[in-house]
Image: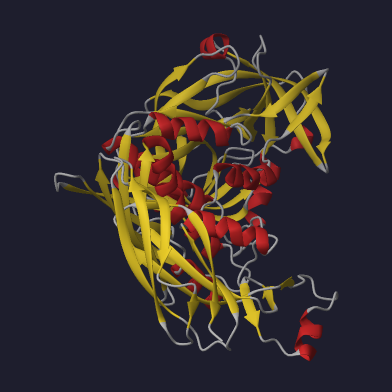
Amino acid sequence: MKKLFLSTILIPFLLQSSSIMSLKDVKPGMVGKGKTVFEGRKIETFDVEIVGILKNVFPNQSLIIANLKGDMAQKAGVVSGMSGSPVYIEDKLIGSISYSFPWAKDSIAGITPIEEMIEVSKEPEIKKSFSALNIPLKKYLNFEDFKSMFNILNPEISFNYKGNVFYSLPVPLSISNASNRLMEKLNEFSSSLRFIPVNAGISANAVDFGNLSSLEEGQAIAVQIVKGDLDISAVGTVTHVDGEKVYAFGHPLFNLGGVEFPMAEGEILAVVPKLDTSFKLSTSGKTIGVFNQDRFNGVFGIIGKVPSLIPLKIELVKENGKEKSYNFEIVNNKLLAPFFTFVTILNTVEIVSKSLGDISYSLRGEVFLEEGKSVKIEDYFSGEGKESIENISILPAAVLYYLMNNEFKDVKISKVNLKIGVEESIEIAKLERIWVEENEVKPNQRLKIRVFFRTWRGDIKEEEAQISIPNFEPDTPFEIIVGDAETLTQYEIKEYRGGEMPRSLELLIRALNNIRKNNRIYFKLRTKKHSLFFRGEEFSNVPSLINEVISSTRLSISPVDLNFSTVREYQLPIDFVFKGFAKIPLRVKK
């Protein structure tokens, strides 16, 4: 990993570190000081009185209970954003404020011992940071799929203390340039992850690298999840600085283990007092390093390292021809990258187009892999604004998810480029009827099929397709299924008894490149013939011996027996989102 250049003038400063007090020396009744930022970048102190020690509140882990005192403690209690705020007794660091009681009258806080936080730095840097749910290949992941993934993480930590529940402090999720829809989505997802989404409304990247020397214990620190024309950052406090090493938060963010999160200095705009949990309103600055551990007892990182992020470029083209480009960098994580790509696209599209009424979007793009391969994304969406915006946003996110969470090989996403066209009209067409020139055909004949469909405005239009008939035996019955992308896919999932993942990375990339598109009429020709569906593919003319082997119950995934065999599939592009489904029974002449 590359390193940022650190001036030799800064090295002596960075090597300074506070002395540490062992947990065994912390006693009830001791009085100390805490450090945090309540406004700007000025570090303020507040009084702390030790109430007691909860030993083994977690397996082989203890927690210090303390009462916070001072004007801000009386006004706002234990504030979200104070996670990581260092506490000292006799100028010795004992740990970080990390837990609180919601709705409490007194400012009672839980302190993670610094010794346990330091252990986080000794954990291995795991390359595979997360293995997400095995979701069968489908065009759209939905928001419930993402929520299911995050529910697995469950980084919220709680325990009972004197009949009340102590929780890890929620973390402010500071967002700049956010739409209402983005805030709505983040509120839905963050409820299970102990985040408080806050619209900062301020341009990001306000802090310069020249302020690197000011990084010290008690300063606001940010974990940047999205940066660029949208900034989404989790904000906490620096607990301990030891040379280039930085310890913060005192509890997990996502509990993902080995990670690669951008580290940035933070600035606090204000503290917003609330009855349940007050929070810091903040913004993040430029990247100064990398957090490479997200563990139970805190977040650990290195100043000066450069994180590997996923560049995302979105070009928006309006109906009048005006173009505007937006550039982002997304955290490189198997779970977080797809979800935050989704919300980034959603936010970008919504702020330049209307959310309600007639709207159509064209999408062209490409996901580039470092191995030189890529997945091309192309589709068309039309209808009510809210649904169309979500669909156009989640398609690239689904492609990222399947690539980054494939079971075959680690892939590195080098960049994502998208071009989105916006029109304020509805371009939807529904199937009216189908005409074929004859129901009995000859082998190798080109059969004309005319498809009539009605547009949203009531106009009847037609398209003609020519289907090549295979060299079937005389009197062979077969059928042509005509349908739209979504209906045809759902029909197949029902027949195949669910979806399956392709059986190699190459086949997965091919499947993603061939995702059906909304502005196509699909023609699927199939005959009554035994075949097998296995690992995302249909197999015809399988020899009996091989059939017995792959049908063996010893396999973890059993094939599905089918009484038909797909011979060919055609697609006909049109200028509308096509809706409809029909079957045409045919027979080869005797």
* Residue 310, quarter of picture: bottom left
Coordinates of residue 276 in the picture (x, y in percent) = 60, 16
Residue 476 versus residue 429 in the image, above or below: below
Residue 74 % position (x, y): 57, 9
57 vs 34, left or right, is: right
Compared to 564, does 246 lie above or below?
above
- The residue sitting at 29% across, 40% down in the picture is 457
Residue 23 seen in the figure: yes
User: In the image shown, does 312 or 543 lie closer to the viewer?
Assistant: 543
Question: Which residue appears farthest toward the front when viewing the image?
Answer: 590
Q: Quick one: 305 or 332, which is closer to the camera?
A: 332
Q: Could you tell me residue 410's position as x and y percent? A: 56, 70
Quadrant where the N terminus lies?
A: bottom left
Q: Where is residue 282 in the image (x, y as percent from the top left)?
A: 41, 29
Q: Which residue is drawn at 71% across and 35% down?
A: 157
Check the image and report above or below for 72 versus 87: above
Judge from the rendering whether residue 419 lies leftward or rightward of residue 529; answer left or right.
Answer: left
Q: Quadrant of residue 426?
A: top left
Counting the numbered discs, the total is: 0
Q: How is the image coloured?
A: secondary structure
Q: Going 37% across and 40% down the picture, which residue do you hit?
A: 383
Residue at point 46%, 49% (across, down): 394
Q: Which quadrant would the C terminus be assigned to in this image?
A: bottom right
